[in-house]
Structures are given as structure tokens and as C-alpha cells.
Amino acid sequence: MPATSRPTSKDVAHEAGVSQSTVSLVLGGKWSGRVSPATARTVHEAAERLGYRPNPAARNLRLGTTRTVLLMVPTLTAPFFGPVYTGAVREAARHGFGVVAYVWPDDAGPADSPFAAPHEAIDGVLASSMEPATLAEFRGTPAVMLDSDPAGTAPTVAFGVADGMRAIVAHLAALGHRRVGHVAAAPDQWTFRARARALAAAVEALPGGALTRATAAIEVGSARDAAARLLTRPDPPTALVCDDDLLAAGAYKAARALGLDVPSELSVTGFDDVLLATALEPELTTVRLPAEELGAQGMTALLELLSGHRPVSRVLPGRLVVRGSTGPARPGR
Amino acid sequence: MPATSRPTSKDVAHEAGVSQSTVSLVLGGKWSGRVSPATARTVHEAAERLGYRPNPAARNLRLGTTRTVLLMVPTLTAPFFGPVYTGAVREAARHGFGVVAYVWPDDAGPADSPFAAPHEAIDGVLASSMEPATLAEFRGTPAVMLDSDPAGTAPTVAFGVADGMRAIVAHLAALGHRRVGHVAAAPDQWTFRARARALAAAVEALPGGALTRATAAIEVGSARDAAARLLTRPDPPTALVCDDDLLAAGAYKAARALGLDVPSELSVTGFDDVLLATALEPELTTVRLPAEELGAQGMTALLELLSGHRPVSRVLPGRLVVRGSTGPARPGR
DNA sequence: TGCGTCGAGTAATACGTATGACTCGTCGAT
DNA sequence: ATCGACGAGTCATACGTATTACTCGACGCA
């Protein structure tokens, strides 16, 4: 226990020789015409002297709001969430809200719920990349889903992953590719299911198009093995479409191990456009998802929800970024 | 505003036909011998029926504690913080504490302080990679610094970055390198100042050792340019020591642009051992920092602090991980 | 029968803040 | 001289919970 506990507004009042109400009035900034400037100054000085800061728990209780929103994500290791957080914070700040992040693994049970803990001292939740079933845990806490199925029951801001996949396939088709390999992430998130579906449909629609698929964990070694499986089949693909940028790094490794040059002998694409995409050599052709925009728009929707309106779900289009990892299909292969 | 506001313990009491005290007693789990099992069951059922969850603000006010800790970081984009968070959460959970993350840019002013907002509804702060000056903002909130100067005034858990640098230099020296280039990050964080100092000292101590340095922003393009500057000098270095893994990716690009093969013609080392290190080709020789351990030990220290003890600062050693980016110095160069 | 004890529950209160209702001089207008 | 209005504060209260002190009936025991 600390030597002395924190000063309260009552202490400040005593120090300044006024009542607690006056302190609250002054420090709340609503004293125009209620408190004389001289008294206000006295109060401010006393507060400063004591190092007073209001007790947030008491304030929250009194006001019935915390003006704080929780950004809930399944992991912090994915580089993807940094920009989402940034966008959310930017938008929240414009309305006087703060944001904290909480990691809730997608496979967590109700016992791990932040709602079993005091974290719940928040007004709403921005839940990114969560399965819709998770929603049940929110039990009345206003929530907006990010990067989830826009057809779900909750307001959602999602990426146009299907559009992105179609753009990739169109790009590859224009380069002459027909046999496409899919280095897929496990379909335990909506976004990966959507990506797989979109890719299948796009290749299907391509005259002469043929799709093969291998599934990997989101990890370089696993992706390398999956890519190697695809490349060592008879009649192997001339292009590998990977479900995200990290998987593409694995594809690079498989290609190198098999002596295939990227992009002259094998084209590789990623998805997301995280930092890694430009750190690789050659730089990765991928789809840029507007992650910061996702955070911002999600926050906008949540704030709408908090003010009693029902926001509409939105889809943010991705954009194909052509870099050095894709090239013309070699007729020979 | 929601249609109906959340049920309180009073509502539950009414529903169950008991007093509010009884509800609190039962739901608090402290009713052994004070409430009959039958009544307890009734209360639980009523709470379930109404979907009751205690108001955290009220509970926090009453108890004077939130059992929540804030992990404050300067950015979420660095892959480094995921493991730190994980370690902190693991340790906190063992003591019934929760963790939320808050991003406070290192260059933020007091106006941006989370302590100006309700986020402050927390018991303590784990401040990672912050300048000690930031500490002044905490104003009495118990804080432990992570990845900061262990000689500072606050309890600190830091990495043994000096040891790590020495290990790198010893490794390079054993391979015959003498002329070392330092691709340095801007010294605005303690850790980078410490790395630079340690590297300088280690090369200094090497017979015939020579150090050149170029500074870069923590970004691939900037690192590429800095590395290129070093490599195009007369009498260029045979090994590039980079302040972190991302900078090493930039060094790879410079080497490739100049037609230098890694590792046969140029050795490159990183620092941190983040995901990127094994995504690169060749895989990066680097120093693994026990980030998860940092989070866990930091949390342990903070919890000690919260229980009135004064924790001691600790330093966690890094470990050299030799991969494919370092090789014997070519006599020719 | 009288008394202490115990089981089962309730009443009352405090945590620290924000705010609507109230008080009490003083001053200007009639 | 009287009254209303206004400026400058203060009083009292509520937010929802956890907990201490209390009540009250039943029961065991001498």
C-alpha cells in the first residue's frame, strides 16, 4: 500500500478553502458565471499543488460513460493491427474518446472473456477478425465487427477481399497464367474463407484456368512446405497466389529451394501489403488493404451506434499493387 | 441511448425477492454460512435471467482497485510488442489481473497523455521503450519501465543489448571480419543508444577493428540507402551490423543492388529476431531478445510494486542466433 | 423458563465525482 | 424604501457496488 493515498477533490477543496462542488465545477470547466475568476485560479493552484487528478472510477460511475472503446483483436503479432489501431484512435480522438487494445484469442472460451474482468469499463467494442459467434459474449455491449462477414448480424466494416482476389487473377491472367496454385491459410477466419471462395470463382471463370490448393499455418516454414507440395506436382502451377504476405515469403523459399526464379519462372502474389512485402526481394505484388481506414470507419460506426443510431455495414475495396514478384508465364512450363 | 439500461444488482435483488446485499454476497462468492444454498441458487438464476453483469465503474470505485494494468508502447507496428504483451498477460492472469494496451507515441506531449482520459482506470503502468522523461507524466501511478535504461530512477526490466552486440562482434571477429559498418537507428531510444555504444566499444577492442556508421530511419528504404553509403566508401566494411532486423532487410537490398552476395561477399546481422528474420533469404543471423520474458518479468515487477515492495531492476540477456547471413570475411575485400 | 448462540438475511454506509436545487448578499430599478 | 435579479458559492444527492454492523427468529442447554 502506498504511503499516502491520492488526493481527492475534497482535499483540493480544503486546500483552496472552498467546497467540493466548486472544485468540481472549476476543474470541469463549466464555471462560466458560476465561480469568480479569482476563485477559479485559487482552485487550479491548489489542485496543481496537491497533484490532483480525478478518480476515473468515480467519474465513470457518476457519468455512466467511460468515453473509452476497446479494440479487440485475436493477436498482436500480426503486423496488420497497428494501422487499424492508429485509424481507430485518430477517429476516436475527434470525438473525445480513447482506445485501448485487448487481445482475445479467437479460440478463447467465455472464461477468458474480458467481460469477466474490469476491462469492461468501456462503452463499446471494436472487434477485429473475430468469428461472429464471439459476438454472443458481448452480451449487450455495443459492438462493431471489423474484417468479418458483412452479412452477419452485427454492424460490420470489412475489406473487399473478393475484389482484391479478382484483381490478382485478372493481373495474372493478363500475364498469361492459367495454372494457379493457392497457398491457403486455414479457413478459420472469415477473411480466408472469403479469399478462397473468390479465388476459386475467379480461376473458374478463366478459360483454361486450373486451381490447385495447399493449406498452411500462417508461418513461413509451413507456407514453404505447402508451396513445395504444389510446385512438385505434375503439371505444376506457374503462379502461386498466397493468402497473405507472410505465406508469400514461404513461397519464395520453396521456389528458391527448387531453383525457380521469381518472377521469371514463377509468379508469386501476397495479400495485405504489410511491411514485409517491400522487405522481400523481389518486392511482392500484393493487394493493399486500407487497414487504417478500416479502423477509422469502424470507429465511426461504433460511435454512431453509441449515439443510438444503427450504422450500416460497409466494405472497403482493396487495391492491387504490382511490384516485382509477378511476370509473364513462361510458355515452356 | 439504449432502449433499456443495464440491470443492476438492485434489479436482480427485486427479481429474486431478496436484498441487494444478498445479491452482492452471493455473486461475490463469499456467502459460505451467510446465505442458504437455496437462496443462492435463486439469486444466480435471477441474475442469469436478467443477464446481469456488475457495473465495473461502481466496483472499481468501491474496491479502490481495477486489477487492470496498462501496457504502454510507443507504436503497435513494431512486431516486437506482440510477445511482450503475451508475456505480460500470462503473468498478470496468474494474479487475477488484466492487461490492456495503449499506444503513446514517444514524441507525444502531456496533452496526449492517457492520464488526461479515463484510461487511467488502471492500477499501474508497464511502459515499454519510453524515454525516462515520460515517467514524469505518470504522476504517482505505479510504473515499471521496459526496455529502458536500467540505471534510471524507475524499476526497469531491460534487455542485455550490450551483451548481444558483443556476441555479434565476437562472432564476426571469429569469421575474420575487421572492418565493420553500423547501420544505426536514430538514437532517440535508449536501446539504440546502448547498441551503438556497445558496438563501438567492441570494435574498438578488436585488434585492427574499424567502425563506420550511417544512420537510418527504421524503414527498409532508408536502411538501404544508409547501407549503400557505407558500402560505396573506399575500403568498405566486410560486415554490416544493423540495429534491428528490419534495417537488415534494407542492407540486403543495398547488397543486391551493388551485386554483393550475402553471405559470401558481405555478412549482415540483425537484432531482435522478429518474424522477418526467418522470412528473409538468406535467413538472418541476429540476436534473439526474450520479448515474452520481458513482458512477464516486467509484470512481475509491477505487481510487486503494487503490493508495496520495491522491485529491483533486471537485465535479460540476449542470445546470438547464427543463421545464413554471416560467413568468413573474403581476404580480397 | 431463560439465555446464549447460531443461521440467514437486511439496513446502512462509503467510495469520489458531477450537478440540480438552493442560499445569501448586493446592486439596480422603480 | 422595496423588490427582483443576479453573481458567487454551497448543499445535498445519486451513480452501483461491497461490506460491516445489525436484526430477528429458532434452537440447544441448563
Image: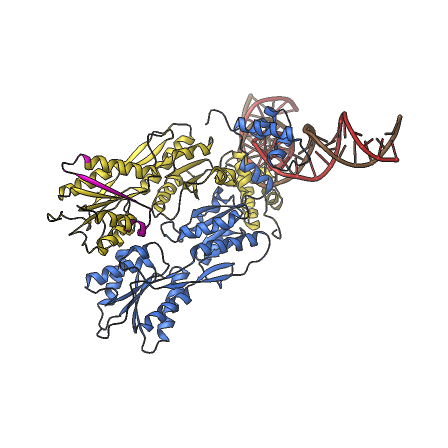
Chain colours: A blue, B yellow, C red, D brown
- Determine which quarter of the picture holds residue B257: bottom left
**Residue at 35% from the left image edge and 70% from the top image edge:** A171
Res B160 seen here? no
- In the image, residue A196 lies at what x, y percent? 37, 66
Find the residue positioned furthest to the bottom: A207
Vertical side of B307 occupied by B319: above or below: below
The answer to whether residue B177 is left or right of residue A101 is left
Vertical side of B37 occupied by B142: above or below: above
Give whichever of B252, A46 is nearer the camera: B252
Find the residue positioned furthest to the left: B331
Residue A325: say if magenta.
no
- In the image, residue A46 lies at what x, y percent? 57, 26
Residue B215: say if magenta.
yes
Find the residue positioned furthest to the front: B234
**Residue at 24% from the left image edge and 39% from the top image edge:** B164
- In the image, residue A157 lies at what x, y percent? 48, 59
Instruction: Tell me the quarter of the image containing the C terminus of chain A.
Output: bottom left
Magenta segment boundaries in residue numbering: B204-224
Vertical side of D6 occupied by B265: above or below: below
Give whichever of A200, A172 is nearer the camera: A172
